[in-house]
Amino acid sequence: MEEKFEQSSSIKTSSLSGQYDTVSKKVIQENPEDWIKFGLGVQDARVIQVIDTEQPTVRSNRADSFIHAEVNGRESIIHFEIQTRDSTKIPMSRRIAGYVGRCIDSFGLPVYSHVIYLHPDAGYNDPGQHVQEMDCYKILIQYKVIRLCELEGQSVLDAKLKGLIPFAPLMKPKEETSSEEWLRQCVQVAKSVTQNQLHQADYLTNLGILSGIILDYEIIRDIILEENMQESSVIQHFTQQGIQQGVREGTIDAILDVLEEQFQSEDIQTLKPILEKIEELQNLKQLLREAARANSLDAFKQTLPE
């Protein structure tokens, strides 16, 4: 019974992590320049292209964002890896070494790699480097570890960094500011940086989803709806229908993440259209369990509906 409970909890966490990762990737790729300047601590940065991570040259974990940019006058690849929790099956340092190696092979450009930890309990033990200590065969790949809970959130709000504000609820608030009051402040600033009504609704929804990493759903719903009673698309997300759709999408993301973590096959992404055709959430949750215990990708494919 205890083993069954632990497996169920792990699957639930994977499902939610998939949703957080997808939203994070979307926000970063819609505002890449903010993240480049923030991550590298530079002002001279120009985005050339957001790279499609589904292409074979850079295919990797679905949460990745690769950006081709000019930094201080030099073309580079900037990589952001989103982690809700710690990487367990494959050490993060090993994963980053693989991503960096692929980028160098594919593009022949300098690579700036970052790992962003969303949950306050994650990332403590990430060494920020992959090291191979062998005479004549030494390897050192360093990357920047960013734990959002250690960042001063007020500076992000003051600067009105559009690409970072949806993550601000996960950052450190001013002293003696409760989590609920901090979320209210983040929502107010988020409203001030978005003009289009529909875009603002999506933006606030993303902020609300990410806030769910540390806050209860009821608190998020009450604060966001309190500030946006006329925003129908925001309200729709925080109704039962919206929640169900969000969980469904997160479960599909989690299935693909679990499979990629275990088998690292380029064929995994071909399963996405098949999974998206499955309407019943319960069936998707069962497939997530099958993905977690499958011995091979072919074995998992046998569990899919024809």
Image: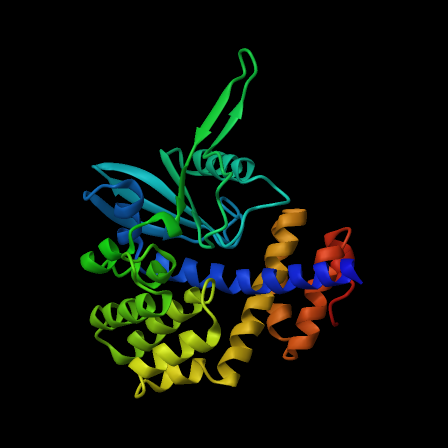
**Residue 77 in which image quadrant:** top left
The answer to whether residue 241 is visible is: yes
Outermost residue to the top: 135
For the N terminus, the image quarter is: bottom right
Residue at figure coordinates x 29%, y 66% from the top left = 186
Q: Position of residue 56 (x, y in %)?
A: 53, 47
Specify whether residue 265 is in view. Answer: no
Residue drawn at the location 55% of the way across and 79% of the way down = 244
Front position in the image: 56 or 254: 254
Residue 297 point in image, percent of width and height: 72, 54
What residue appears at the point 50 percent right and 22 percent down from the top-left corner? 139
Residue farthest to the right? Answer: 1
Q: Residue furthest front?
A: 176
Q: Quadrant of residue 27?
A: bottom left
Q: Measured from the top left, where is residue 44 in percent x and y?
A: 19, 42
Is 197 on the left-hand or right-hand side of 299?
left
Residue 227 screen position, x and y as percent: 29, 80
Determine the residue positioned at 20% across, 71% down: 192
Q: Quadrant of residue 232?
A: bottom left
**Does residue 189 appear left or right of residue 24 in this picture?**
left
